[in-house]
Amino acid sequence: MKKSLAKTLNLLIVVIGITGLQSAIAQTAHDDKITYSKDIANIIFEKCASCHNPDGIGPMSLLNYEEVRPWAPLISYKVQMREMPPWHLDKTIGIRAYKNDISLSDQQIATIVSWAEAGAPQGDPTLMRSAPDLPDAGAWQLSTLLGEPDFVVQSPPYTVTANAQDQWWVRDTPFEGLIDQPRYVRATELKGSYPLGVKVLHHGHATLRSVDGRGNRVSGPVGRQGVGKSGDVFSDGTGMLIYPTGSIRWNLHYFPINQEVANEQAEAAVWLYPEGYEPEFRTRGEQFFAADTGPGGLWAGDIVLPPNSIKSHQGVRVLDRPALITSFRPHMHMRGRGQSLEAVYPDGRREMLARVNKYNHNWQIAYEFEDDVAPLLPKGTMLMLTSTWDNT
């Protein structure tokens, strides 16, 4: 069974980390002359171009030397502070192999810093490979892997005002006529409309609510999106069962961009397994749970965070069946500082699975474990989620 779960560094480690980076910078300074064409372009193409392109969510395009050169000092600063590329995991603890790791190595950071300090030379343009072929910004990202989706559902229109606070919008729409029998879902993706909807949609959920063959209410995600995460592909042999009728609950968080976006409609795409296919494992998709709270759950208004204070909350959930954890996606809002996920096994052993120690609410990254290290937890394992907020 697969179940995707989404729901502080001591001084010694910091000193070691900084010393290691300084050592890498010193070594790089003695290497052959670092240039954009020979060294920097490849790093940017690999780690930055997916966002920093004319249609991307980055504030500037970085696809050629003319675009990169004016930003060299800022790029150097951002990578030294590990603010860019966005990857907020503590690399010193927990599982360390991720499918979607876009962080820079110490050597890559040192190369960028040395290049910027040397005046950001271009070098020989003939040594530079071509800019990467980027997917159509308005297309489904999973279509390159899975082809076109089996069906797409669309939210009602909503106008995002130009200058305002963040806007949360919840609506229900009927779900009918798209499938004629229960089917297993292979993958889902949620996005805003192109070109402006993708820029104002900070994160969102599309949840299909139905009734199963025994009259029980069931729900499952047909889209979970955040800046840094757009879709989910279930592991081989794993599927989520959905039913032909019901309703879709849209829960969308919009972020104004100083430009009105009229009649914005989010879309959720679904890829199905073939008719009659029975997966070996069945999942409910990404699920939320409220740790150590009553039926109403724990919400932002329930957390008292006075000025100049730091507060942690720890909750647990005991698994009532074995579960495979395939990703970790913290969500804490603006005062969030860090969040960790720990497993306490039935025999008393404890294992830190993942810890984000530099949480940034501008990003909603799902940290996807590599298949060979994704934790398979037995029934009775206690999941311990520790969250820290900082209002200093």
Image (spheres, rainbow, N blue to C red):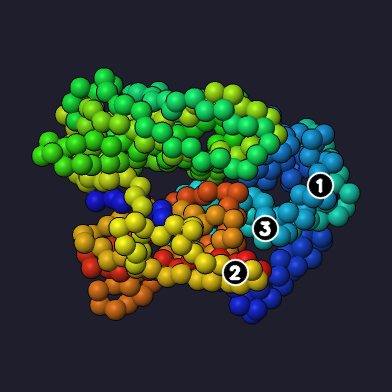
Residue found at x 20% / y 41%: 217
Between disc 1 and disc 3, whose residue precedes? 1
Measuring from the top left, give residue 322's x and y in whole percent.
23, 59
Q: Which residue is disc 1 drawn over?
A: 72
Check disc 3 and report its element: helix, strand or loop: loop
- The residue identified by callout 2 is 306
Q: Nearer the viewer, residue 53 or 302?
A: 302
What residue sits right under mark 3 in the picture? Answer: 82
Query: What's the distance in space between the residues labelled 2 and 3, CA to CA?
Result: 29 Å
- Identify the residue at image location x=56%, y=67%: 305
At label 1, counting other C-alpha atoms closer than 10 Å, the crowd grade (few under 14, some 14-19, many 20 or more) is some
Residue at the spot x=59%, y=24% of the render?
A: 262
Q: Is residue 131 among what the camera can see?
A: no
Mark 1 and mark 3 in contact? Answer it, CB < 8 Å. no
Between the residue at mark 2 and the residue at mark 1, the CA separation in whole angstroms equals: 39 Å
Name the residue type under label 2. Pro
**Apparent side of residue 247 relative to residue 162 in the rendered image (left or right):** left
* Quarter of the C terminus within the rendering: bottom right
Q: Amino acid at mark 1?
A: Ala
Judged left or right of residue 234, residue 198 is right
